[in-house]
Amino acid sequence: MNTPSTRLWRVAARLLPRRFRDAFGAELIETIAAGASERRAAGGRRAAAAYACRELRDLLRLARDLRRRPVQVREPLQRRLHQEMTPMVNGFRTDVRWAWRLARRRPTFTISVIATLGISIAAAATAFGLAAAVLWKPLPFDDAARLVFAWEAVEGDGTTGPFRVTAARFTDWRRHQSSFASMAAFGAAGFTAVGSDGAVMVRGVRVTSEYFDTLGISPALGRTFGPSDEVPGKHQVVVLSHAFWQRWFGGRPDAVGATLHLSGEAYTVIGVMPPAVFPGWPVNPATVTLNTDARDIWVPIPATPQWAGNARSHVHGVLARLRPGISLEQADDDLNRLASASAADPHGARLTPLREQFVRDARLPLLMLLGTSIAVLIVACSNLAALQVSAMEGRREELGIRTALGAGRVRLARQLATESLMFAAVGGLVGVGLARLSLTHLPSLLPPSVPFLVPPSLDLRVAAFAAGIALVAAVIIGAWPVLRSMTAAPSPRGTAFAARTMVYRGLVVVQIALATALVAAASLLAQSLGAVTRQDPGFVLDRVLVADVTFMGPAYGTPSSVAQAERRLAEALASLPGARGAAAAYDHPLEANWTDSIVLTGAVPARDDVRWSGQLRIVSPEYFDVMGVDVIEGRGFSEHDDLSAAGALLVNEAFVRSADTGVLLGRLVRSATPAFSWKDAVPSEFVIIGIVENERFRGLEEPSQPAIYMSTRQFPQQGFTALVRTTGDPLASAGDVRAAVRSVDSTAPVSRVTSLADILAEQLVERRVTTDVIGGLAGAALALSVLGLYGLVAMMVASRTREIGVRLALGALPGAIARQVVGDSLRNALIGVVAGVLLALLAGRLLEGLLVGVTAGDPTTLSVVSFTLIGVAVLAGLVPAVRAARVDPARALRNE
Amino acid sequence: MADRVVPPLDELPLTVPVFQILLSLADRDLHGYALIRDIDARTNGEVRLTASTLYGAVARMLDAGLIEERPPQGDGRRRCYRITRAGRTLARREAERMARATRWAREKRLLPGAAGRMP
């Protein structure tokens, strides 16, 4: 209303003190105006004037009175209400502000919630990022889904093979197949090159001309190989890797056309590749790595009839690109039909998609890591949910007032949901930040065997995953408070307490169940790690230095020249001050992988149909002594078993067992040894002169395989591993070993110097890291669930203080009270542990592939874990139990 | 909300406006103008509060915790007031005091009726 009279009254009201005017002025004037119009209607102008006079008089009196005796006018409730209720009106932004105010009022709670959420979201997001980088990210090749590796394998026998491919087999496949757009073979080739700082090893790959086209990688400079480069005599051309080009030619474009001397022969540089990712040399079909810098150069394989006809040397990896529309199964059938049609030999084909090939064993640990971190996240969330449930009790009053002040249920629910969302959002941000850090730094800490096809990073997918789990976390954390505010008014203490306890109990049971399952899994993995490390490798592992040595070049044209150089080196190494002995072997025992077969020739006619396959080991006469491998029957190699003597061969116990053909010692066999490099200069028939103990050739996790040993004196290898047994730290002798190699041949490169123990550690690091990480996560889950259980018991005790006081006052014994509290804790733990054991049995199937020496359902492990958890639960109940027993009845009753 | 009772209002006797406001609020919540009309009607025009008197009293009573504000109702502009427990107690004591005074007056034959009996 805004009439002339109200305007006058408004002027008059200025006499009143400001605070009073602010609070009541408007209403006062409105009331006066309403009274005036009523008087005017009833008694005319005169009555209205009398009324106005009276009002004015009292207004003046009030003004005087208020100046003498001020009133503490509080802010009008309406305005206060307005402030309180604004969030309920203005929506999300104010909801957030409200939650923020609340968060600031209880900083410890807020920080612990956000830290817990942040860390567990970070763990899950990191696990997801790692898994995505290995399992799901697109491979860095054109249309990579069509790329496959082809191996040889024995059909119908999943355990035999896969093997690398012979040149004859590859040629056959390539000629007759119809499923592939292209197919290429590749194999390792070591060269030496003399640069400014002496001789270096150049890691090369021999490839057929289709190699780069199959991968779909074009050169950065020049060209790649064509069929003409495979023609023998025209094959001395080379393609450089980007890194080698930078290193050797300083990145000059005129490198194309230049000449590069490799192992003393001149090669013409025809192209330079971009810094792309290439498959590494298949050490064995189980280990193909992808690397940007593993290879220096590529050279063509000259297509000689000898090469194309070699059906013995399983030395090639084969990459193939499926024709569009052809499935893996069709291609598999195609190649296997060829195999059965072409030869009497049992090897068929086995195709492995490119990603499968690289991922292999990493899938299980990565998925386990992801699963475990999500389980921990669930434990953490239910812990926080339980915290919220008990915090709700403290906020009962507050929420009651809000409802009384007119906040609608939906409104309240929305605010509580906003609060949870805010926790999750901030926790999620913290988590994403931490995940970004760990994804950048973790890969360098992880074993090199983790096959990162692309470096892990915090990409959109990982961020979306983190956001998703943060949302799920918000739902878990906020569900109870929101549901409570929706379904029930702030209710009498009793009923709310019962419902709350049920929910809280449920959450605690979930936590204990997950913790039990995780601890069981971690314990099984730890036992497996222990079992693996306790395996006997069959040789003495300690204090052995390993060095890869190459004698290559024009000086080593004959087998005897290589054998002599190697003998001189062995002598030089054995006489080093820190050495107790030295031996040479083609591949050191932990990573050996050369399978071959022999045929018994003693029988007439030669039984060509009976072949025995085994690991082919070419070792120097000192090998068995130096490595501590016992010769059980017959004798070991001697210096007399050389190129001029009859071929001698040893087999191991596993071979004897697998051959199962009576007495082997002294029998004559024909080797299927690749005579590729030395032809007739080396023996092709051998006498079995001895039987040795089993050694493990591929680390401690693979069982001992049948093996055939030949002497380096009869079958010299240009590239081999020197093994030096030392008196002290093997790596301390590294310098001496290099010097010894130089003293034999100053141009011979030594490409790697390490120790057997380090190689083993590297082989075990993946298992160790998996075990440690899952152990750590299980520990975190256990700690969280114990905290949850403790919180539950403490809450029960606190809310029953009065009852306990009454019972104590009535003569109950404190011990009985304490027992009851502990018993309650125990009951919850039991339910959780039983559920956890069931969960562990279910999840155990996934774990099986990683277990050694223990089964997933191992009763000892499960019962030890169960009892441990129950024990911990009792401990968690103990503190509140003691508190309950010490309740002072008088005080408990007074407080109420 | 505060049940505190702050001097000087807890001292009897209460002023006429304070007592009448408490009486009017005894059985329902009312806003300012409605209070004036209710008191007017209830006392047959004997007590006619001006707006200033009313709001002066209301301010002090709010301060003392005898009444409290209620969220606006209906048209949503006028504040309503509700009597607090303290306000009710105080009004009852004032009424008892008046009853005693009436009894004493009867004993002295200032008023008709039997002494010691409420009319």
Image (cartoon, grey):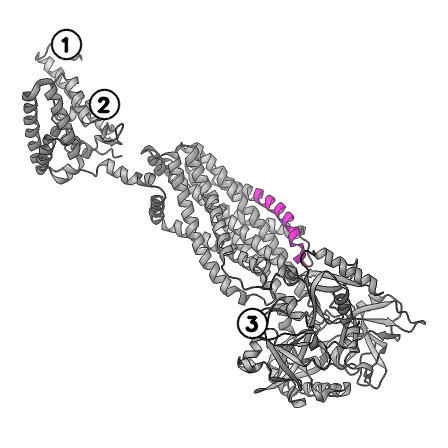
Mark 2 residue type:
Ala
Q: Is-magenta flag for residue A847?
A: yes
The residue depicted at 64 percent of the width and 54 percent of the height is A847
Look at discs 2 and 1 and give the one toward the viewer: 2
* Mark sitting on residue B26: 2
Residue sitting at the far top: B113
Look at discs 2 and 3 and give the one toward the viewer: 3
Q: Earlier in the sequence, mark 2 or mark 1?
A: 2
Mark 3 residue type:
Pro
The residues colored magenta run A830-852
Quadrant including the N terminus of chain A:
top left
* Mark sitting on residue A275: 3
Quadrant including the C terminus of chain A:
top left
Give the residue at mark 1.
Answer: B114
Of residue A171 and residue A353, the one placed in the foreground of this image is A171
From the viewer's perspective, tell me whether residue A9 is left or right of residue A828: left
Of residue A187 and residue A578, the one placed in the foreground of this image is A187
Chain letter of the residue carrying label 1: B
**SS for tag 1?**
loop
From the viewer's perspective, tell me whether residue B68 is left or right of residue A706: left
Of residue A170 and residue A803, the one placed in the foreground of this image is A170
Q: Is-magenta flag for residue A303?
A: no
Residue sitting at the far right: A604
**Mark 2, residues whose alpha carbon is within 10 Å: few (<14), some, or many (≥20)?**
some
